[in-house]
Amino acid sequence: MSISPQTEKMLRVRAALEPALSDAVAAAIVDDASDPKAYVANALLRPPQQQTQQQTEQPAAAAEPTDGEIDRDHASDARPQPTTEMLWPGSFFVDRFSLVVSRHVFNGWVAQPSPCCAAASVAGACNAVLGLPHDAPAALSHLHVAALYHGMLREHAAKRSAGVARLLGVDSIDPVLEAFREALLAEGRSLGGRKEKACKGKEAMARLRDLCEAKAAEVASATTAAAQDGAEAAPPEGRVWSALWEVMQSVRGGGGGGGGGGGGGGVLEEVAPAQAQAKEGAAEDDEDAAEDEAAGGGGGDGGGFGTRIRSELKTLFSKLGGCEQLAPEQPRLATTYIGNWGMHAAVRALQAAAFDDADADADVDPRLVSLRGGAVGAERAALCARLRCRTLVGLRIKGSAAPPVVLRRADDDDAVEAAWVALKAAFSAERSCLLLHQKNHYSLVFAMREWVDDDDAASAAASPSEAAEAPAEAAPATAPAAARRRVREVLTCRKGQRPTLWIDWREIHGYITGWSGYAIMEITAE
């Protein structure tokens, strides 16, 4: 059956106008336009080149920089805006479809220029709940939060250093740390270096053992010579090397990170940064108290004492490595050693402590000067005083308060659905932002959607980019009970901070129930 030229023309015009009309209506809903008709009309009348600039291109795999770093947002990429292409499933008309979008998260998220997701995500979440666009004068940046992390780690490192000195019975271990840094620097390495330039964990302890052995031998030789000449005993710096060598002798392996040690070998087990985050999930004071209590049960043979000092040293090296990665002069910030504990602590600091000592002029981080400075600093302090942070979704951990939404590996369909409903209610609340700790990344939740899919197989609505980025090991928390599949997804990202893909709730449930370090945190403003 043929159609008339007029009908054919009408169909072509309709096909051209429908996508633009859908995008304009979606934008009016997201922006909560006071006059939707005028908003849609203006959007349709906008010149094509202006529309193109404001529309979001489908996320594509970004070219990898020359340094091999891909965990970042590129400044040349335009900030995405919510469109029907981004928010709707591939099939527009799906059964029982619902969508919740946070306009404030789209406006407030902060670009991540390096692997500093723990700083950029917190800054973006705070901006969102305070109603601040990312470029507002009072908005927080990743540099502000990184400065807070740096201060925390520096305080933690000083506390650990003083603790080790106290256990060894010496005034300070600064000579040891200085000599250790110099030895690493001579090889172009450091505690907070990248990849092959980093010295941490088992290798750092083995290298310290070698240095202690050499220094202790020098002290012993100097002490013997002094005794023959009738001079005084070894100076304090010599005593710290001798005392430390007594507890480092059991460490085995060369400077290349060789075999495990006897005695305190368990302390030298390599700990990945993500595992270190979970182990430091509690408050620092609680962690120290637990270690002190455990160390008190050491036997009279001194094994417990030596193990405790080696454990303190290894934690100290981690803190120092984190300080180096977040130092003001560091051009490429990294939050490798910051876990959930640090994000909670940063929000608490922003409530007041971060803005204290604003007039101090000694040893001030320039990023803190920017945070506190001038009239904008006063406005920012008043806004940040309203911030709160809590763990919303996670596992029940012995000795810790259970989060409001507790997940279990054995959750059935009803429990998975109940957790989703609670998560959606929190996301929909005013002045609330969800921060997702997923595998090796922190990111914000920009939107949530759900529908019922008639397809028994994988959802045909997933975009090619989503399929490419989804991990192969992802498995649903519970198998579908019928052919009609319930689809529940959150809009977030796996690299950088810009929204790039939808992740299935079953996948999130699966990895949160697989390790206690993964969780969903909620940042709010009172």
Image (cartoon, grey):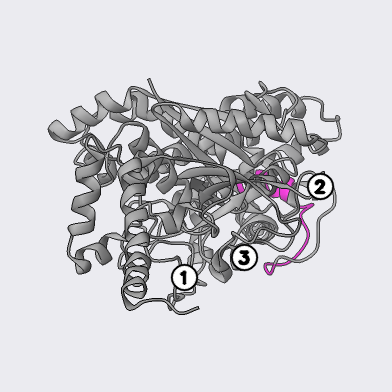
Which one is nearer the viewer's eye here, 27 or 79? 27
Residue 362 in the image: above or below residue 270: above
Can residue 143 be seen in this snapshot? no
Q: Which residues are magenta?
A: 239-256
Disc 3 marks a residue whose amino acid type is Ala
Tag 3 residue: 467
Which one is nearer the viewer's eye here, 476 or 180? 476
Tag 2 residue: 479
Q: Could you tell me residue 454's position as x and y percent? A: 70, 52
Q: Could you tell me residue 255's position as x and y percent? A: 67, 67
Image quadrant holding the C terminus, namely top left
Can residue 265 be seen in this snapshot? yes
Seen at 62% across and 56% down, the residue is 225
Quadrant of the image occupied by residue 457: bottom right
Q: Residue furthest left?
A: 375
Tag 1 residue: 60
Name the side, left or right, on which 459 lies relative to 424.
right
Of the two numbered discs 1 and 2 in the rendering, the one whose residue sits closer to the viewer:
2
Which one is nearer the viewer's eye here, 376 or 304? 376
Seen at 76% across and 66% down, the residue is 258
> Which numbered disc, 1 or 2, marks the residue that appears first in the sequence?
1
Q: Could you tell me residue 25's position as x and y percent? A: 33, 48
Task: Determine whether the residue tagged by mark 1 lies in a helix, strand or loop.
Answer: loop
